[in-house]
Amino acid sequence: AVRALVGNADLKSTTKAILGALISYCHNKDFCYPSVQDITNQWGFAPNTVRKHIRILEKLGFVATTKEKERNYLNTKQN
């Protein structure tokens, strides 16, 4: 499913880059909890850009967010 997303020509390169950033935090697990600030600091995206593209990934079913931690959960078990 991640390959389908990355190969999708209709998605912006920034959405794909944010997905790549999230995957880099997973370390071979199905989940990760980087903050928007973590992604901003390491990858150079503006906070609003990170939030926007995480919402896009969430709508597509690739990312689920947990509000209690205000962190992002990457769901890598999509078919």
Image (cartoon, rainbow, N blue to C red):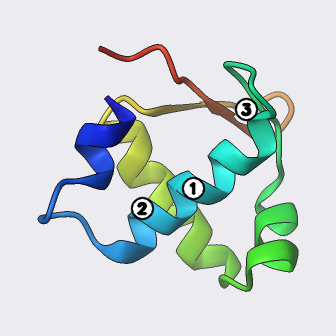
Looking at the image, residue 22 sits to the left or right of residue 53; the answer is right
Q: Is label 3 or label 2 in front?
A: 2
Q: Residue at x 22, y 53 (%)?
A: 7
Q: Residues within 10 Å of mark 3 (few under 14, many from 20)?
A: few
Give the numbered dot on residue 2.
none
- How far across and how far down the image is residue 16, in percent? 42, 62
**Residue bearing the label numbered 2:** 16
Q: Is residue 8 left or right of residue 35?
A: left
Which residue is painted at 29% across and 72% down in the image?
12
Within the image, what quadrant is residue 64 found in?
Answer: top right
Marked residue nearer the N-terminal end (3 or 2): 2
Name the one closer to the observer, 62 or 64: 62
Outermost residue, left direction?
A: 10
Vertical relation: 20 (above or below) 76: below
Report the mark closest to the observer, 1 or 3.
Answer: 1
Does residue 36 sit above or below 44 in this rendering? Answer: above
Q: Amino acid at mark 2?
A: Lys
Helix or strand or loop: what does disc 1 sit on?
Answer: helix
Residue assigned mark 1:
20
Task: Tell me if I can see residue 9 in this picture.
Answer: yes
Label 2 Cα neighbours within 10 Å, binned few <14 / some 14-19 / many ≥20: some
**Contact? badges 1 and 2 (CB < 8 Å):** yes
For the point 73% across and 85% down, the residue is: 44
Q: Earlier in the sequence, mark 1 or mark 3?
A: 1
Instruction: Find residue 33 and report its horizontal and vertical position in percent.
Output: 82, 37
Q: Nearer the viewer, residue 65 or 62?
A: 62
Q: Secondary structure at mark 2?
A: helix
Q: Residue at x 31, y 28 (%)?
A: 1
Which residue, given by chain and number where applicable, does mark 3 sit on?
67
Please name the amino acid that badge 3 sits on. Lys
> Which quarter of the rendering shows the C terminus?
top left
